[in-house]
Each structure stands twice: as structure tokens, then as C-alpha cells.
Image (cartoon, helix red, strand yellow):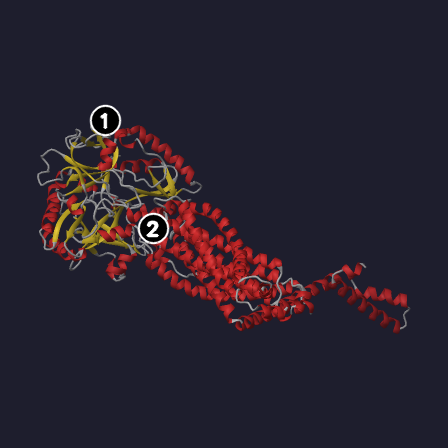
């Protein structure tokens, strides 16, 4: 009995040793020894039996492993060949399953490629997780003043390098028209923070980062390739920017071009002693590399110590600062991380619906193959062997879908990059690289398990007697039918979650489209200009030049009105300031943070911003006359609740040129403007006449303004007039950022529109797949119950009764799916709550409408096979029975 439980290898080793021993004993007996003596001598000659037994066992195990691998691969090859023949023999089933899975795998792979490029791929410099964004607010990104930066740089014990940057525009000289490039002024240790060396040349030295030194510049790889033909000899040459000569000392590597919108030239900041002593004017962005052994939280505590001292030493300008330290990557990715992960989750749900659909198809095919599998089992095939064969078929199907899905992913990724809104960092770098292809392979394998395992296990347990008796008709069991119904419920639930998310974003888009931006974008063209400081140093020359632009533009042919503003809605530029209303103590805590616009007369008229009270600016509002301002309606309500703001006064937190309060009289109240987009609230604003702007205002806005022109026809045609005016005023000043206000308004909604379109597309795909799944299951049930339905009709059931019976049974899993899906949607929609406007994540109207739509589609999918059931020939069904 004990031998039965011994491993076969043990018996084989024992038998082999016994055989050799007996052969040697017989040989010795033949030579004249007694049996006892011969056995003892044979054992002695045999040697160390335990060691020999162990060695034979090792050799046997190695042989068995080799044979097992050979047998396993032979069986796998056999299963693959059989699976291929089976799929070729059933082209309809194979094509539907391939396309269903390929759509899911392709969409998931395309979105994952974007997620990897934007969110998962490390930034291209050493130890990117050690680089921190350092700011004067807890969230980390609030800009710092030059004086505060100097104190933090000297006193901190957390950063091995701490660099500062602020962005500016440069007019790069060209043969015809100058080119505007985005650049940055940086401290000499800015590049040290990132640990990146130039591809050509060198970086700034500490001496070059001081006032009065020769002007030097480092080029980005992108600008070097575009403007200088990738010529390394450009290092050491001279280029002109803002009409000044700059020596090119280096070219950064291509990897340092983080995004297509990043800066293209770097010049030393070269702060003056006066700037180092300035603790107001917060405009620097700080990046620091953590010392070894220091983490983000220790650095924040260290920075908090310094900030507390700065608040005590400079209470007037540092009363609200705090310590902000967060990984640069967090700020770099921004909201794109959340949005892309939501989309990845959505396409994952589509893939899951596809897997459920194919699982249902396999279950149905398994019922038709019951006799075949029963014969295999009767001939000795174990259940594990049958499961392995069925899983191999699923794997072949999934790999084929994966190859097709990769092709779809190539197309999908191109569409995704082409249609995505601007501002998604590194999205243009998304590609089907190694990590993405590995993800596609994993997605295909996971899909094979998801849709193949349950049908394989269910199908591999056939009732041999019932299956063989059923002949070629196949057999079905109640357990398998309930499995199909459960999968239908899962499809409905997943599709409902997708559709509710899409419905909420659609309602958000409708709500945003109904909002009044506060201005009329139709017929308006805008463009930016930046005057070089060296040629426009005097404040009166700057103001008079901008005023001249507005006057000459208004006189141009086809122009109804024109103006100049430091910022236009939905555009770059501008700034903000704290305003203290008359009647409140002149303390920082009483100030109202308000967005500032410097404008020429006629700006409100050109933009068609309604004037609620008072008047617009005129040419008489200039320096030397009483200071005036126009405020937005929401500012007036905050500053002077329940009062008429006209005639009231406000003052900026900063002192005026005479070091006393620079009071400004409110002469107008304008409508609120959604300056940052329809999806954000209108901020409080105030307008100043451009001829009354304080001299240092031009440094605030870097001598950059927007030209706005309202024309009689197509606004883009006004570009010619604007260029002609600029050529007359100063041909060396480039125009950039030319676009219509309609285009700006459309771009402000591009992210929301992009997310909506993608989620709606995924929701529709999920709805179609769910409808196909419901149709397939109901059609299968009708086919399996043909005889039963025929007998019912023979016994008096009407077509209406049969229709009600079939649809009623199909509604049960749909109803369960709707209930489960509603619960899942209540949780899932929280992921898109930040993207919704004017509608809550649990909006009952959207839930009810989407649920009703899905129910109608489900009923429609059931009606086709249900009507087929009403045409069953009762006599034929009885004859077959």
C-alpha cells in the first residue's frame, strides 16, 4: 500500500539499483561463490548506495523536467495549431471577437502612451525626484521676490543648489521681420539645480551673472535647430536680441526642451544691488535640488524658519508668505495628470466591456462545443488539459487582437496628439515605444485571462451523459446561463458609468456655452507686441508709442475701432494689485486683490464690454490730471456694497511717486469679464489710462501689450493692417500671438471639449458593445429554447406572450446592471468633479436620462431576437421534441 503513494521516480531508482545488484550476484555465483557471499561482495563492489541513489534521483529529475518541457511545448504547439484552425473555421465569431478586443486594446494603449509620456516618464535630468519647486505659499508655486530669494539662498540648509528664473520675451533679429522668442532670465546656478550640461559650449559663470558684464546667451536645442541649422559653430558668434548684441556661449541638449512651449533662450538675471534689497515685487520662480539625506518635508520646515524671520523683518510686504516646497514634477504635470488618468480609467472600462462581451461569446460557443469536449473527456483528457486548450484559444485570440490593437493605437495616438489642447506637457513626445508596447502585450495577456478563464473553467466541466445524448445540438446548463446573465449585468453597469461621466461633461459644455464672457468676441483680432527696453527706456515714449498704435489702427481701412491693453481676456500678459477702498485703514489686510489692465481710450467700446455706470477714458486722462480708474462691477460690490461707486476713491498698496497715497477716482463701472475662461469666475478688475500709468508699470508688464481691432468683415483679414501700422511705427518690433477673440474663446474650452469628446466616444463604444452583448445573449437563449417556445405556442401562447417572456427575462440582468452601475457612478464621477461646471457629480437628471437611454437601447437589442422567437414553427418544434 505504501508503494502506491511513492513517487514513480523513487520506484524507478530502487528498481534500477536492485536490477544491477541481482545481475552482479548472479555473476559471482556463476564464478563459484555461495549466494550469501556473492550478495555481500556485490554490495561491497556497488559502493556508497545512498550517494548513488541520490545521484540517480537527480539524474531522473533532470530527465523528467526535460521530458516535461518537451511535452509541454509540444502540447502548446498542438493547442496553438488547433486554436488557429478553430478560429479560421469560425470566421464570424473570430472577427467579432478580434475587433471587440482590438478596439479596447488599441484605445487603452494609445491613452497609456500619453499617460506614460506626460505622467510616468521621468524628467530628463539626474534624480528628478530631488528637484523641488520652492515658493512663498504652502502650495509651492507662488513666486518669490528677489530679496527673499537672496535670503533663502544664503540661510537654507536643505538645498545643494537654488536657482531662480523669470520669463520674458526677446525680439530676435531677422532679415525681414524680427522673430519673437520666449526666453528667461536665470541665475547662474539655475542649470546646476538640474545637473544638465550643454551639448555645445558652456553655461554661465557667477561673474557673468552680475550687472555690467558682457551680454551672453544660451540657446535651446529647438531654437538652435530651427534658426541656426544645427550648426555647432554658432557657439562663439554674436546674435542680436532686443537690438543688443549677445554672445552665444552654449546650446542645451534636446532633452532639456521639456515641452514645445518652453523657453528658447536663457540670459543671466544679473540682479542689481537695489533688486537684491527689494522684498516686494514677487515674480521669481525658484527651483532647488535637495541635499543628500534631506526630504521634501524637512526642506519645508527649514524654509518655514526663514519665512518666519522674513515676515518679522518685512511685515508690510511679507505678511502672507509661508513655506512652499513640492516636487517640480507635480507642478510640471499639473492638472493633466488627473485628466489623463481619468481617460485611462475610461478606456480600461471599454476594454473590460470588450472582455465581458468576448467571454459571453466563448460561453455560447462552449455550449455548442459541449459534445466535442465531452468526447475528449471520455477519451481520457483531464479537466486541466481541456482548460489549457481553451485558454490557449483565448490567448491566440488576444494576441491577434493585440497586434491589430497596436495598429489602431498608432492611428489613435496621432489623432490624440493632433486634437489635444495646448498646454499638455510632453504630449507631443508620446510614441509607441518599448514601455508602451510592453503595456500592450500585458493588456493582451490580461484580456486573455479576463475573457478566457471563466468560460474555459465553465466549458471544461461538461455533463458527459447529457452532452453525448444531446448529439450535435450542444448542451447548456443553468449555471452557464446564469453566468451569461451576470456578464450582461456587468456590461450594463460599466457602460452606465461611462455614459454618466460623458453626460455630465456634455451638460458642463452646454452650461459653459450659455455663459456670457462679458465681451463680444465676434469680429475682433488681437496681437501682442513687446517694445525693447533699450530703445524705449523713457516711460513717456512707451506710453505715447502705445497710444499712437491705437490711433493709427483705428484709422486703418476696414477697422471700426481699435485699442491697446496690457492684457486681453483669455490672453497672456497683465498683472494684479491690491486695492484699498476709501474709508478703510491703509493696511495690507484691507486690500482687495484685483486684476490690472492698462488701456487706451476706446478699449471697452472695441471689446464691447458694457459700461454699467460712469464714463470711459478719454485722451485728457493723462499724467498731470486727476488720477482716474474704471472698476469691474464685482469689485464695486465688494469694495462699496450697496453704494454707488462712481466718485469713490481707491489706492494701490504701493505708494505713489511722491511716496504718498496715489488715490484714484472711480469714473466708471464696467461689466464683469471672465478673463481666464468661461470655466472660471470673473475676477475683480480695474482699468487705468495708459497715459496715467506709473513709470515702473512698464517694467511690471515688460513693455508688452495687446492690440485689439474690431473690423467690418473677417477679423483675420485685419492682420495686414496691423502689420502695416507696426512697420510705420517700428519695423524692428515683431507681432506675435495673432488670433481672433473667437479663437481664444474656443481655445479656452479646448481642454473641456477634448475630454468631453473622448469620454463621449468611449461611452458610445461601451453602449454599442453592451447592446451587442445583450443581443448576443438573448439570441442565444432564443436559439436554445426554440423547442420550449414552440410547445408554448402550440399550447396557446400568443406571439405577444412569447415576446413579453423573452424581453422580461432579458430585463432582469439589465435591471441589476443599472442598479449596480448607478452605485458605481456615484463613486466614479468624483474623479471628474473638478471638470464640471454648473452641474454636480451626482446630478439626478443626468443619472435618470442616461439610465433611461441605456434601458431603451437594451430593450431595442432584445426585440430583434425576441421577435424571431415569435416566428417559431410550433409543429416543427413538437416534431423535434
The residue identified by callout 1 is: 584
- At mark 1, the secondary structure is loop
Residue at 23 percent across and 27 percent down: it is 586
Q: Which quadrant holds the N terminus?
A: bottom right
Residue 357 versus residue 192 in the image, above or below: below
Residue 457 screen position, x and y as percent:
61, 60
Q: Nearer the viewer, residue 793 or 721?
A: 793
Residue 395 screen position, x and y as percent:
54, 64
User: Does the image show residue 348?
Assistant: no
Residue 384 versus residue 588 in the image, above or below: below
Name the N-terminal-most of marks 1 and 2: 1
Q: Is residue 817 left or right of residue 60?
A: left
Calculate the distance from the C-alpha at mark 1 to the C-alpha at mark 2: 41 Å
Q: Is residue 559 left or right of residue 331?
A: left
Q: Nearer the viewer, residue 274 or 315?
A: 315
The residue identified by callout 2 is: 752
Amino acid at each position: 500500500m505504501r508503494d502506491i503513494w511513492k513517487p514513480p521516480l523513487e520506484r524507478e531508482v530502487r528498481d534500477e539499483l536492485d536490477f544491477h545488484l541481482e545481475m552482479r550476484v548472479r555473476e559471482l555465483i556463476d564464478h563459484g561463490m555461495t549466494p550469501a557471499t556473492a550478495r555481500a561482495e556485490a554490495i561491497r563492489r556497488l559502493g556508497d548506495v545512498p550517494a548513488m541513489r541520490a545521484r540517480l534521483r537527480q539524474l531522473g529529475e533532470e530527465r523528467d523536467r526535460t521530458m516535461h518541457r518537451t511535452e509541454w511545448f509540444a502540447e502548446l504547439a498542438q493547442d496553438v495549431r488547433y486554436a488557429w484552425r478553430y478560429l479560421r473555421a469560425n470566421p464570424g465569431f473570430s472577427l467579432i471577437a478580434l475587433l471587440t478586443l482590438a478596439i479596447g486594446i488599441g484605445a487603452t494603449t494609445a491613452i497609456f502612451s500619453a499617460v506614460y509620456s506626460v505622467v510616468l516618464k521621468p524628467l530628463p535630468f539626474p534624480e528628478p525626484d530631488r528637484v523641488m519647486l520652492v515658493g512663498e505659499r504652502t502650495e509651492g508655486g507662488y513666486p518669490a521676490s528677489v530679496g527673499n530669494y537672496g535670503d533663502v539662498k544664503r540661510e537654507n540648509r536643505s538645498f545643494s543648489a537654488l536657482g531662480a528664473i523669470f520669463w520674458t520675451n526677446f525680439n530676435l533679429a531677422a532679415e525681414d521681420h524680427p522673430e519673437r522668442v520666449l526666453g528667461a532670465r536665470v541665475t547662474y546656478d539655475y542649470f546646476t539645480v538640474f545637473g544638465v550640461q550643454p551639448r555645445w559650449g558652456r553655461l554661465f559663470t557667477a561673474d557673468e551673472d552680475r550687472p555690467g558684464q558682457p551680454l551672453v546667451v544660451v540657446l535651446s536645442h529647438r531654437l538652435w535647430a530651427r534658426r541656426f541649422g544645427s550648426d555647432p559653430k554658432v557657439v562663439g558668434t554674436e546674435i542680436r536680441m532686443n537690438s543688443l548684441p549677445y554672445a552665444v556661449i552654449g546650446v542645451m541638449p534636446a532633452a532639456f526642451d521639456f515641452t514645445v512651449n518652453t523657453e528658447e533662450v536663457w540670459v543671466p538675471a544679473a540682479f542689481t544691488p537695489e533688486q537684491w534689497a527689494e522684498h516686494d515685487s514677487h515674480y521669481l520662480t525658484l527651483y532647488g535640488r535637495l541635499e543628500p539625506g534631506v526630504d521634501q518635508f524637512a526642506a519645508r520646515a527649514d524654509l518655514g524658519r526663514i519665512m518666519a524671520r522674513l515676515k518679522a523683518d518685512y511685515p508690510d510686504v511679507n505678511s502672507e508668505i509661508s513655506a512652499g516646497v513640492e516636487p517640480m514634477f507635480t507642478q510640471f504635470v499639473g492638472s493633466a495628470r488627473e485628466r489623463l488618468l481619468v481617460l485611462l480609467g475610461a478606456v480600461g472600462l471599454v476594454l473590460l466591456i470588450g472582455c465581458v462581451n468576448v467571454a459571453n461569446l466563448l460561453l455560447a460557443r462552449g455550449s455548442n462545443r459541449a459534445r466535442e469536449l465531452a468526447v475528449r473527456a471520455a477519451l481520457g483528457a483531464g479537466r486541466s488539459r481541456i482548460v489549457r486548450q481553451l485558454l490557449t484559444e483565448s490567448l491566440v485570440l488576444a494576441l491577434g487582437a493585440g497586434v491589430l490593437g497596436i495598429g489602431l493605437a498608432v492611428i489613435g495616438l496621432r489623432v490624440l496628439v493632433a486634437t489635444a489642447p495646448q498646454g499638455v506637457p510632453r504630449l507631443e513626445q508620446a510614441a509607441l515605444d518599448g514601455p508602451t508596447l510592453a503595456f500592450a502585450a500585458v493588456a493582451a495577456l490580461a484580456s486573455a485571462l479576463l475573457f478566457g478563464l471563466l468560460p474555459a473553467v465553465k466549458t471544461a466541466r461538461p455533463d458527459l451523459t447529457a452532452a453525448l445524448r444531446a448529439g450535435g445540438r450542444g448542451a447548456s446548463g443553468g449555471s452557464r446561463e446564469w453566468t451569461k446573465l451576470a456578464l450582461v449585468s456587468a456590461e450594463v453597469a460599466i457602460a452606465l458609468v461611462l455614459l454618466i461621466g460623458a453626460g455630465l461633461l456634455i451638460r458642463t459644455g452646454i452650461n459653459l456655452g450659455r455663459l456670457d464672457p462679458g465681451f463680444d468676441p465676434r469680429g475682433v483680432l488681437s496681437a501682442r507686441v513687446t517694445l525693447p527696453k533699450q530703445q524705449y527706456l523713457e516711460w513717456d515714449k512707451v506710453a505715447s508709442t502705445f497710444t499712437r498704435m491705437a490711433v493709427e489702427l483705428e484709422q486703418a481701412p476696414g477697422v471700426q475701432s481699435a485699442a491697446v491693453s496690457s492684457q486681453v481676456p483669455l490672453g497672456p500678459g497683465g498683472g494684479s494689485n491690491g486695492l484699498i477702498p476709501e474709508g478703510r485703514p491703509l493696511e495690507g489686510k484691507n486690500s482687495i486683490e484685483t486684476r490690472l489692465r492698462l488701456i487706451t481710450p476706446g478699449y471697452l467700446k472695441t471689446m464691447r464690454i458694457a459700461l454699467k455706470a460712469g464714463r470711459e477714458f478719454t485722451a485728457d486722462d493723462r499724467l498731470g490730471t486727476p488720477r482716474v480708474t474704471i472698476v469691474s462691477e464685482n469689485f464695486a460690490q465688494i469694495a462699496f456694497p450697496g453704494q454707488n461707486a462712481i466718485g469713490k476713491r481707491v489706492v494701490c498698496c504701493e505708494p505713489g511717486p511722491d511716496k504718498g497715497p496715489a488715490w484714484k477716482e472711480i469714473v466708471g463701472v464696467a461689466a464683469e469679464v471672465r478673463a481666464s475662461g468661461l470655466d472660471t469666475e470673473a475676477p475683480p478688475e480695474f482699468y487705468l489710462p495708459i497715459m496715467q500709468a506709473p513709470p515702473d508699470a512698464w517694467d511690471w508688464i515688460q513693455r508688452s501689450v495687446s492690440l485689439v481691432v474690431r473690423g467690418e468683415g473677417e477679423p483675420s483679414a485685419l492682420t495686414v493692417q496691423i502689420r502695416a501700422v507696426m512697420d510705420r511705427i517700428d519695423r524692428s518690433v515683431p507681432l506675435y500671438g495673432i488670433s481672433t477673440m473667437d479663437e481664444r474663446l474656443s481655445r479656452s474650452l479646448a481642454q473641456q471639449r477634448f475630454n468631453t469628446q473622448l469620454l463621449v466616444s468611449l461611452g458610445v463604444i461601451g453602449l454599442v458593445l453592451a447592446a451587442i452583448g445583450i443581443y448576443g445573449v438573448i439570441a442565444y437563449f432564443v436559439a436554445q429554447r426554440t423547442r420550449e417556445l414552440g410547445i408554448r405556442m402550440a399550447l396557446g401562447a400568443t406571439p405577444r406572450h412569447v415576446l413579453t417572456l423573452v424581453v422580461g427575462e432579458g430585463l432582469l440582468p439589465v435591471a441589476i446592471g443599472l442598479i449596480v452601475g448607478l452605485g458605481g457612478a456615484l463613486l466614479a464621477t468624483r474623479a471628474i468633479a473638478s471638470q464640471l461646471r454648473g452641474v454636480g457629480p451626482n446630478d439626478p437628471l443626468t443619472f435618470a436620462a442616461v439610465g433611461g437611454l441605456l434601458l431603451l437601447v437594451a430593450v431595442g437589442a432584445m426585440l430583434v431576437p425576441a421577435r424571431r422567437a415569435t416566428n417559431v414553427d410550433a409543429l416543427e418544434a413538437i416534431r423535434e421534441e
